[in-house]
């Protein structure tokens, strides 16, 4: 195991400026994750010992001066130096590494921070933490810290709430891990018993798990508008292909954004209608509506992303050449040498239509940005429930109304001169948003909203009178 290094007593490191009044923590491993945990623990007054198979080859001080107070010892020495031992080893190496030192794990709290490789995880019925618990039954195994990166542990002190999920069967051991988590600046969340650690490990293998359906819906909506726009602006007009990358695509992206935004708020409106029909909040929504409700955040953020792209593309090509009806033109008449008169524009100013269209677009984008920012966990956690509901409901719906007005001002004047109005993209893309706004308006009427609030408060329309019961 290499030459043993004598451990300094706890009070010895106070001369180096470190508060070591707290208990000593052992970490098995000296990799990136182990060093990050050691750094965070030392910064918060803990004495740290790292156990390694080759302690004489590990010099942690070369990575960070903070780690000069961290002693690297053999694994058995590290196990004997603390009651709480963090296992910062690869998932498939933990059991084999600790098996020779089984006696040192008796009565210890073993904190598993590992995440199994995705391919190795497939086909496994139990989590890595459960495997460790079976291999070392005389130790209390707790799953924690596996949802954080080494960077977040070592450097992230200011980005808001960082949850650490804790799972274990021993309540006293879980309590100590929660206390440790809280002491080093994180927020502990008891996730359940050790059997729930499989869910924590699976959580790290998921790639945008909640985004699959919203992305598919976004792709379908975009494809529908793209095909319609391709026919409307290019094929029908005889091959005006040079305008496809910017002008036509801008309309397609804008139509996709407003459709997604409407779908985001339409789900809540339909939920209110379903509750009115059922007359109770205790009956579950239909499966399709339940899934739709759960993806509103993702749909809204995708709408915000596309709206931002639409805004940038608008700024790139808003000019009198593309939108002549948005401008008032000042002209002069110039007489040529041969006596002909030529009208020359010398100044373009936005008229009321152009100014209103741009203003409503800016207003909609600003409010939609606020709603999107309030959806981020670091900001949402700092809002009260009333503040969060005001932003998501009222400001969100106002952004939808402003978006509808923005499109209406741009597209409506063309409807008068069109023989077939349904061929206008501005008309078609307003159908779902307008229906959504009207539905939300009806649900906001006092007698309707009051009825819905009564249902959501627990009142049931068809509830029978409860029989009188006598308790002995």
Image: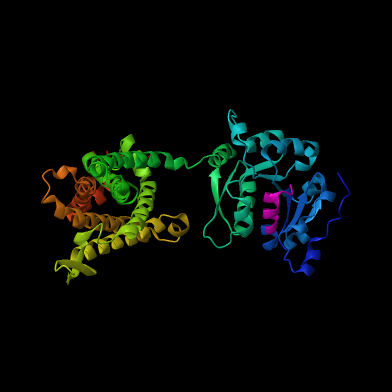
Residue pictured at 19% horizontal, 63% vertical: 353
Residue furthest to the top in view is 123
Residue pictured at 72% horizontal, 57% vertical: 23
Say whether residue 470 is visible.
Answer: no
Instruction: Tell me if residue 452 is in the magenta stretch.
Output: no
- Colour scheme of this structure image? rainbow
Q: Nearer the viewer, residue 175 or 67?
A: 67
Residue pictured at 62% horizontal, 54% vertical: 151
Coordinates of residue 44 in the picture (x, y in percent): 67, 62
Looking at the rendered image, the quarter that the C terminus falls into is top left
Per the picture, the main secondary structure of the magenta-coloured stretch is helix
Coordinates of residue 411 in the picture (x, y in percent): 19, 53
Q: Is residue 179 above or below residue 461?
A: below
What residue range appears in magenta?
29-39
Residue furthest to the front in view is 338
Q: Nearer the viewer, residue 34 or 136?
A: 34
Occupied quadrant, residue 40: bottom right
Residue pictured at 37% horizontal, 54% vertical: 309
Q: Nearer the viewer, residue 273 or 151?
A: 151
Coordinates of residue 284 in the picture (x, y in percent): 32, 38
Residue furthest to the right in view is 3
Q: How many marks?
A: 0
Coordinates of residue 211 in the picture (x, y in percent): 43, 42
Is residue 214 left or right of 400 when viewed as pictured?
right
Is residue 333 left or right of 172 when viewed as pictured?
left
Occupied quadrant, residue 104: top right
Q: Is residue 414 above or below residue 225?
A: below
Say whether residue 92 is visible.
Answer: yes
Looking at the rendered image, the quarter that the N terminus falls into is top right
């Amino acid at each position: 195991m290499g030459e043993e290094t004598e451990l300094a007593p706890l009070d010895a490191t106070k001369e180096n400026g470190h508060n070591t009044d707290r208990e000593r923590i052992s970490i098995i491993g000296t990799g990136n994750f182990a060093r990050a945990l050691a750094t965070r623990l030392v910064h918060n007054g803990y004495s740290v010992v790292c156990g390694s198979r080759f302690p004489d080859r590990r010099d942690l001080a070369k990575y960070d001066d903070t780690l000069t107070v961290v002693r690297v010892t053999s694994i058995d020495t590290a196990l004997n130096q603390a009651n709480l031992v963090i296992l910062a080893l690869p998932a498939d190496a933990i059991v084999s590494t600790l098996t020779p030192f089984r006696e040192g794990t008796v009565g210890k709290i073993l904190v598993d921070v590992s995440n199994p490789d995705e391919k190795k995880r497939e086909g496994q019925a139990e989590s890595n933490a459960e495997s460790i618990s079976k291999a070392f039954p005389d130790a209390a195994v707790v799953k924690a810290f596996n949802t954080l990166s080494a960077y977040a542990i070592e450097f992230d002190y200011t980005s808001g709430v960082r949850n650490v999920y804790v799972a274990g069967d021993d309540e006293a051991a879980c309590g100590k891990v929660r206390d440790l988590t809280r002491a080093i600046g994180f927020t502990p969340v008891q996730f359940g018993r050790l059997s729930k650690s499989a869910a924590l490990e699976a959580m790290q293998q998921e790639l945008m798990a909640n985004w699959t359906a919203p992305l598919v819906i976004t792709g379908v909506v975009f494809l529908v508008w793209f095909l319609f726009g391709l026919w409307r602006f290019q094929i029908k007009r005889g091959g005006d292909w040079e305008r496809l990358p910017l002008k036509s695509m801008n309309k397609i992206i804008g139509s996709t954004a407003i459709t997604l935004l409407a779908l985001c708020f339409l789900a809540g409106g339909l939920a209110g209608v379903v509750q009115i029909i059922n007359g109770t909040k205790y009956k579950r929504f239909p499966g399709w509506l339940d899934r739709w409700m759960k993806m509103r955040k993702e749909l809204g953020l995708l709408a915000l992303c596309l709206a931002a792209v639409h805004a940038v593309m608008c700024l790139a090509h808003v000019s009198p050449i593309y939108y002549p009806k948005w401008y008032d033109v000042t002209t002069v008449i110039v007489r040529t040498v041969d006596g002909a008169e030529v009208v020359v524009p010398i100044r373009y100013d936005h008229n009321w239509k152009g100014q209103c269209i741009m203003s409503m677009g800016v207003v909609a984008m600003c409010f939609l940005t606020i709603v999107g920012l309030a959806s981020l966990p670091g900001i949402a956690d700092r809002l009260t429930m009333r503040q969060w509901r005001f932003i998501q409901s009222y400001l969100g719906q106002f952004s939808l109304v402003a978006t509808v007005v923005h499109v209406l001002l741009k597209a409506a004047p063309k409807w008068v001169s069109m023989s077939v109005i349904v061929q206008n993209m501005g008309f078609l893309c307003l159908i779902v948003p307008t229906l959504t706004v009207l539905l939300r308006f009806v649900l906001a009427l006092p007698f309707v909203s009051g009825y819905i609030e009564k249902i959501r408060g627990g009142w049931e329309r068809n509830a029978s009178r409860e029989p009188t019961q006598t308790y002995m």
